[in-house]
Image: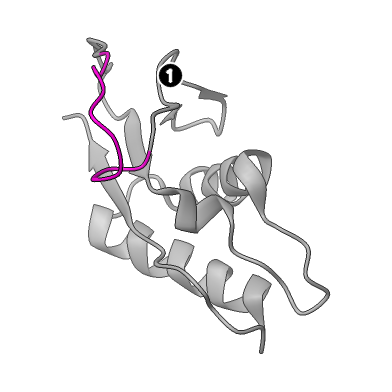
Amino acid sequence: MVLKPDGSARKLSIGKHAPLGFITTEYQSETVTLDKDELLCLYTDGLTESIDESDTMLQIDGVQQMLQKVYKDSGNESTQTLQDKFTRLLDEYEGNAIRTDDRTFLLLKAR
């Protein structure tokens, strides 16, 4: 997904693929142009499948809402700082729930 400094977001049109390493498949690609200060977030399903203590999945909308809050509140800071703040929100969401998958994500800010 791509976020603007004002907190608005747009989802990429491509992003549903078979798990890597399981089957031979063709992958689609998409070219995305980022405007100055837009933030690109790429992530694995382990992020959207994060669960809280009541076993509720975060899902794509939850990831988007968390990132929107972080970027709207701290958009002028480094991507490392944004990553740290996002990770703290994820930790708060999960609480003491047992993590069963990775939480892999990549943030890239256009300059």
Q: Which residues are magenta?
A: 19-28
Instruction: Name the residue nearer the viewer: 107 or 48.
Output: 48
Residue 92 in which image quadrant:
bottom right
Q: Residues within 10 Å of mark 1 (few under 14, many from 20)?
A: some
Name which residue lies at 28% across and 46% down.
107
Expressed as whole percent of the image width and height from the top left, the position of residue 13 reads: 45, 13
Q: Which type of secondary structure does the marked residue at label 1 adopt?
A: loop
Name which residue lies at 52% across and 47% down.
67
79 left or right of 53 in image: left
Task: For the N terminus, give its image quadrant.
Answer: top left
95 to 90, vertically: above or below: below
Name which residue lies at 20% across and 29% down.
110
**Can residue 94 be found in the magenta stretch?**
no
Instruction: Please name the amino acid that badge 1 sits on.
Output: Leu
Instruction: Name the residue nearer the viewer: 77 or 1.
Output: 1
The residue where tag 1 is placed is 12
Expressed as whole percent of the image width and height from the top left, the position of residue 7 reads: 55, 34
Task: Judge whether residue 70 can be spotted in this image.
Answer: yes
Instruction: Name the residue nearer the viewer: 105 or 89.
Output: 105
